[in-house]
Image (cartoon, rainbow, N blue to C red):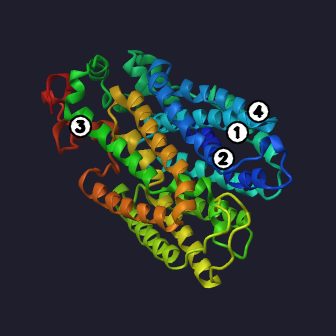
Amino acid sequence: LYLAVFSAVLGNFNFGYSLVYSSPVLPKFKGPDVDPRLRMDTEQAAWFGSIYSLGAAAGGLGAMLLNDLIGRKLSILMSAVPSTLGYMLMGGAVDLWMLHLGRFLTGVAGGMTAASIPVYISEISHKKVRGALGSCPQITAVFGTLTLYALGLVVPWRWLAVAGAVPAVLMVILLTFMPSSPRRLLSLGREQHAEKNLRWLRGSQYDTQAELRNSPSDSINTQARITWAQLAKPIYYRPILISVGMRFLQQMTGITPILVYLEPIFAKSNVSLEPKFDAAIVGAVRLFSVIVAASLMDKAGRKALLYTSSMLMFLSSLTLTMISHSTPCPPDPAPHNLTALDYSSNNELGSVLQLCHHIVDCLLGYALGWGPITWLLMSEVLPLVARGVASGLCVTVSWLTAFALTHAFTHLVDGYGLYVPYLLFTVVCVFCLLFNATCIPETRNRSLEEIENYFRTGRTFTIDRGHPSVQPSRTSK
């Protein structure tokens, strides 16, 4: 099981790596020594930072079809194609269009993995370790960002792109030998193959029949004939709305623009340490935070970590808003540019260090809850029949939101300063608290079938084998 999860989450490593690729390289494209054909102005830099999210939305749409058409495992494998092509284009770029197209293609790969890997992991994992393993996509994504920041200290930008292709190739080699999802095989009526794969995942002494009985093929086959009319039933629309809402709020907390423009943000704050070192330190803090979250996922529960995460982000965002508003940079003679290196140095050192401290706090809060748990809950609460399509929908909504926010971030900061986006993120954190309190169920130590039964019956996790509500096609509840 751990080997299969490791093989899959190499795709998330690539996702985290490619997401923040723009952070260390954008200052170089703005510098005086760059090839004139690759020099970027404000608008081009905004597109280079945000077009990844547009590609990820396209990848999410593709995963909506591929997850159910060819399966979760093959969907993950397919993501290596746009990923490798994208890195080749960026590594050998001689014009701006190659940089933008390459970044878009790595975004497509990121969207495909974001929609497929959490579903694959949740379907192969035992319920006792599903929480910890379900946070592995976020852990490896954060490790990917940390690797990019660390390599960015010493490796030229072209070789950064070349290095990004290595995890994708390794993922293809390892994942080829891993089993497909037993639950998906059951949905296809391939019971013997499902039992064989489950025994490989659990061990030769494990009672696979007991687990397979909790995923009755009759029920799964009945669900496979779902119609648009059935989507109006609570068992389907409630978990889909919860998943879409979580992914929307996750992006509205501002995590993507902060990560994409992390070095320029630190440069704007005039920290005494070089921005690239600050970014690497933040990457290490995020990695530590998600590891802590993974260790607590199956002990403290999902909702408790989400409350903690929301409060930390709210307090740090509110503080950042007040600091940024009370110590604004004076206007420059020329229009201000977020991605330039020559920022005003008029902020007091104490306020600057305070600002950076709270940026780290905000990212730490996100990594404790709304980062890893959103990935996990999406794969837990979505019903099997809609899991492939709905996970793709969630990722598409998530990255369209990220694209709009990331593209607007540069212009908001140039026009009004950092305090305006920070204020928006503060308000969103309040909605995160309310959404967790009213909409999200606690799924700790629950099987996927018990979670599905919760939405089918209204409020009960316990499965009544003799009750007709076990067959979802016969009841609106």
For image coordinates 27% across by 20% down, the residue present is: 226
Q: Quadrant of the C terminus?
A: top left
Q: State the SS at label 4.
A: helix
Q: Are marks 2 and 1 in contact (CB under 8 Å)?
A: yes
Identity of the amino acid at label 4? Met
Which residue is denoted by mark 1 in the rendering? 167
Q: Label 4: which residue?
A: 88
x and y percentages locating residue 154 in the rendered image: 83, 56
Q: Which mark lies nearer to you, 1 or 3?
A: 1
Amino acid under label 2? Tyr
Image-based side of 434 in relation to 7, left or right: left
Query: In the shown orientation, is residue 113 left or right of residue 249?
Result: right
The residue sitting at 26% across, 35% down in the picture is 237
Point out residue 338 in the picture as x, y percentages from the top left corner: 63, 59
Measuring from the top left, give residue 432's x and y in whole percent.
35, 58
Give yes or no for contact between labels 1 and 3 (Cβ–Cβ under 8 Å). no
Which tag, 4 or 1, sits closer to the chain's start?
A: 4
Residue that carries the numbered disc 2 in the rendered image: 17
Residue drawn where x is 51% and y is 77% of the image: 323
Q: Which badge, 1 or 3, comes first in the chain's sequence? A: 1
Given the image, on which type of amino acid does mark 3 rest?
A: Asn
Of badges 2 and 3, nearer the viewer stands 2
Question: Which picture quadrant has residue 454?
Answer: top left
Query: Given contact means CB atoms under 8 Å apart, are the residues at marks 2 and 3 in contact?
Result: no
Q: Disc 3 marks which residue?
A: 453
- Residue 310: percent from the left, percent from the top? 39, 63
